[in-house]
Image: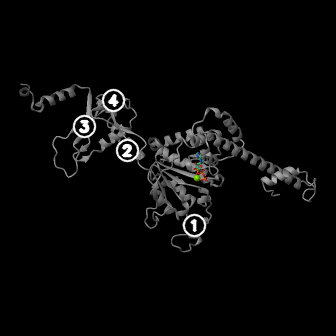
Amino acid sequence: ILHSFLPPELRLSPDKLSRRLFRYFSSYCYYDIAELDGVSPNELYNAVQLYLSNTASVSATRVSLTRPPNSSTFTFNLSNNDYLYDTFNGAAVSWEHHVTQRQSQSFSWRPVSDEKRGFTLKINKKDKPFILPAYLDYIMDSAAELRRKNKDRLLYTNSRGGGSIDSGGRGWESVPFKHPSTFETLAMDPALKDEIIADLREFSEGKAFYERTGRAWKRGYLLHGPPGTGKSSMIAAMANHLGYDIYDLELTEVQTNSNLRKLLMKTTPKSIIVIEDIDCSLELTNRSSGEKKEKPPAQKPLPSGAAASGEEAQVRSVTLSGLLNFTDGLWSCCGNERIFVFTTNHVERLDPALLRSGRMDMHIFMGYCSFPALKILVKNYLGEREEEEERVWMELEEVLVKVEITPADVSEVLIKNRRRGRRVALEELVKVVKGRVEERKVVDGGEEVVEEVKRTLESPNDGGGGGTEMSVDDERLDDAKEGKELTV
Ligand SMILES: Nc1ncnc2c1ncn2[C@@H]1O[C@H](COP(=O)(O)OP(=O)(O)OP(=O)(O)O)[C@@H](O)[C@H]1O
Ligand SMILES: [Mg+2]
């Protein structure tokens, strides 16, 4: 009866009709996202699945857990007909996963699953203008990010072959990057560590900021400090924290500025470009001086093998300005989201052009082992602190301020004595640090004596310089000789 009264477009089966009526009066709208679009996979379905499997708001009543091979984390998927709630821009949405059996198996060249899977997104009609399509874009971006984080990261180098960039080779050779260093295991001042982590987060989330301010989306860090203080470990921790690849650029292997540019052009976004020991890699003379720069001794001969004239050598070698052009000049915008890290043991040897403000955004000094850093190292190697160790810790805190010991040295002692038990390892550490204090006293004493001897020799009233008697305590002089060679 109803059919005969209704217009043709509404003459539907009761089931469909009731659904349409329900949707018409409902305050929600629904979006179906099927696994397959015809026979090809639906990218959005995969993105939603990945996004939901990592979303923090696990409010579904039943989820299926999985652990992919070689992964340390569990992921979960929605079970059939279960819901998960999410919020975006303050609006609540829900996702339902449905799995149904395929009715008829039409012939297909590709293997098609027996099940038909899909997600249904339910959002309030009033929220629709505010969250669509931004929410779906956000899901696609988040999924791409998760995919990148889950994939093996790579360490590239230009010094292991990979084909010379000149002869059309790739220039970079890669290996899987598996360095275990993280910010948690990195022993350094906690305040500085937090500052670096915050800086990295700001950088990686700063796309809009960099666009708005017209700056190239890149950041430079200069790590300096004595050997064995964790500069390389810091780079690994940065890469692990951000999930970036690392390009370890061996400058001495690059022959010309143009090759350097080609190599850097081949780096991918979301990567860290590292130049270790920059003071040794290049003759980093002041680029404005216009003087001819001698080819650095470490630099390899030119591929042609021909002896280049002085002029040619100048043109055909990597210069500071060539490097800065890429890190800072017009070329810096070729490729987004890149971090440059330079390390050096001698910051004072670097060209001021490299140090001027704005060039390297952050100068990080990796110093000798402080007490908070020591606590992290002990925790890394020996585990959590125990109750009855108060005395040893007090002793360590007291002596540590008197010496310069690198985290690498501390690690060495702890690794060597780890098997002998925690207590013994700590006692050994105290012994080593105290030993260093004693050594230092001798050296300091020696230096004092040297100064005193110098003063005596230089003073004409005392008859110094003529081999006459000196008023130096013999015993201290002996000590000094043991500790340090006298060079007066
Ligand atoms: N701050 C640190 N935190 C944790 N471990 C450290 C730290 N510093 C050094 N180590 C340990 O010492 C070893 C050497 O450190 P690393 O290679 O990072 O030093 P570096 O500063 O890069 O030295 P170099 O200037 O000689 O290149 C590392 O394998 C690491 O185990
Ligand atoms: Mg290093």
Question: Is residue 308 positioned above or below 138 on the image?
Answer: below
Query: Residue drawn at (54%, 49%), measured in percent from left and top?
Result: 235
Question: Is residue 423 positioned above or below 222 on the image?
Answer: above
Q: Is mark 3 on a helix, strand or loop?
A: strand
**Spatial separation of the CA atoms under disc 2 and disc 1:** 53 Å
Most extreme residue toward the front is: 420
**Spatial separation of the CA atoms under disc 3 and disc 1:** 68 Å
Q: What element carries label 4?
A: loop
**For the residue carrying disc 1, how many other residues have a C-alpha within 10 Å: few (<14), some (14-19), or many (20+)?**
some
Which residue lies under the disc numbered 1?
Answer: 314
Residue 321 placement: quadrant: bottom right
Which residue lies under the disc numbered 4?
Answer: 61
Which residue lies under the disc numbered 3?
Answer: 99
Task: Return the x and y of residue 456 as percentages of the image width and height.
Answer: 88, 53
Question: Is residue 487 positioned above or below 124 on the image?
Answer: below
Task: Return the x and y of residue 385 as percentages of the image width and height.
Answer: 60, 35
Relative depth, front residue between 199 and 446 = 446
Which comes sooner in the sequence, label 2 or label 1? 2
Which comes sooner in the sequence, label 3 or label 1? 3
**Spatial separation of the CA atoms under disc 3 and disc 2:** 22 Å
451 relative to 16 in the view: left or right: right
| Residues at circles 4 and 1 in contact by the CB criterion of under 8 Å | no
Query: Residue drawn at (64%, 50%), measured in percent from left and top?
Result: 226
Which residue lies under the disc numbered 2?
Answer: 68
| Residues at circles 2 and 4 in contact by the CB criterion of under 8 Å | no
Kind of residue sitting beneath label 3: Val
Task: Return the x and y of residue 151 as percentages of the image width and height.
Answer: 41, 48
Kind of residue sitting beneath label 2: Pro
